[in-house]
Amino acid sequence: MSKQVIICSDSTSDLGSALIEKYGIQIIPLAVTLGGRSYTDGVDIAPDMIYAHYVANKELPKTAAPNYAAFCAFFEEQTKNGAAVVCFTISQTMSSTYNNARLAAANYPDVYVVDSKNLSTGGGLLVLAAAEMAQGGMAAGEIAKAVSAMTDRVDASFVVDDLEFLHKGGRCSAVAALAAGVLQLKPCISVRDGKMGVGKKYRGRFARVLQTYIADRIGDGADIDTTRVFVTHAGCDEDIVAQCVAQVSEALPWGEVHVTRAGCTVSAHCGRNTLGVLFMHK
């Protein structure tokens, strides 16, 4: 009988409760500090609380990685009955989560930590691939190796409507934010080699920009793995999200399109009107 393999992820994978429950994924939440109080991402704080607090106080939260002790406690609990663990984290260039998990995993013989080299559902794509491998009976070490080799195939990007949160969080200059506002620029933020960078800059109304962005990212769709495609947003208008889903579904008629809401990490850094289409290349 093969050993049970538990697939887990930090809370930045933004998979949503339906997929988490369907695949039996365990989540290790990041910590969020807001208004002098400490919260647990996805447990007692949600993005809309962040937005409401910002409107009232002009204060953004601080997020923190689960520490070494938290990972040790988690791995101890998951492996106590003999299970193996494959744990995914946000890119190590964006957080200390990976390093904390790696150090804790060294205490356990069958726990493997994978740097997703991504954020949000970019990492979530890898988590779900690992969950399917586990369901197929693959051993934990083999899963970690196989999925680690897939990280460069992930296409993760977002379009940001307003640079206010990025500016307040110290991720863009006041000059850049002002220029973007005056010129109605909407930057595409993409992940490459585990790092976020600014790609194409779109101009115009957010809804129209998203149409162009989706067309640019998908192209003719020939190189896209349509097993699973995510439309992930940080609280966009429902009509805009529906429009984007329809466009993706039309472009990739054989694709499995999932809509998820970004959690506190992406929401705190990018703001409410942020939307991305995330998928894997063949």
Image: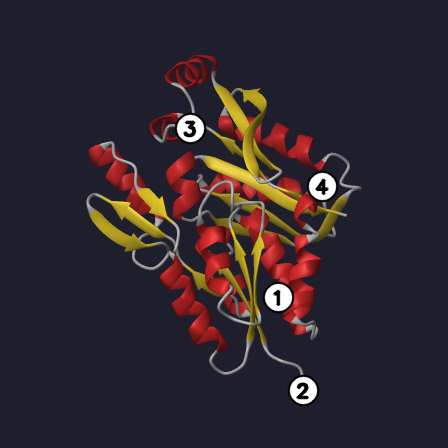
Determine crowd level at label 1: few under 14, some 14-19, many 20+ residues with C-alpha closer than 10 A.
Answer: many
User: Could you tell me residue 13's position as x and y percent?
Assistant: 51, 52
Type of amino acid under label 4: Ala
Residue 136: quadrant of the picture:
bottom right
> Is residue 83 toward the left or the right of residue 63 in the image?
right
Mark number displayed over residue 131:
1
Q: CA distance from mark 2 to mark 1?
A: 18 Å
Q: Which mark is residue 1?
A: 2
- Pointer 3 residue: 171
Distance CA(mark 3)–CA(mark 2): 50 Å
Could you tell me which secondary element the residue under label 3 belongs to?
Answer: loop
Residue type, numbered disc 3: Arg
Q: Secondary structure at mark 4?
A: helix
Mark earlier in primary sequence (2, 1): 2
Residue 229 visible (yes or no): yes
> Is residue 272 at all visible to an observer of this figure?
no
Vertical order, 39 against 83 (above or below): above
Which numbered disc, 1 or 4, marks the residue closer to the eye? 1
Q: Residue at x 52, y 66 (%)?
A: 25
The residue indicated by pointer 4 is 251
Instruction: Rate crowding at label 3 as few (under 14), some (14 to 19) or many (20 or more) other CA atoms within 10 Å.
Output: few
Element marked by disc 2: loop
**Residue 145, percent across and down?**
68, 59
Q: Earlier in the sequence, mark 1 or mark 4?
A: 1
Q: Dots 3 and 4: beta carbons under 8 Å?
A: no
**Mark 2 vs 4, N-terminal side:** 2
| Residue 46, above or below 273 | below
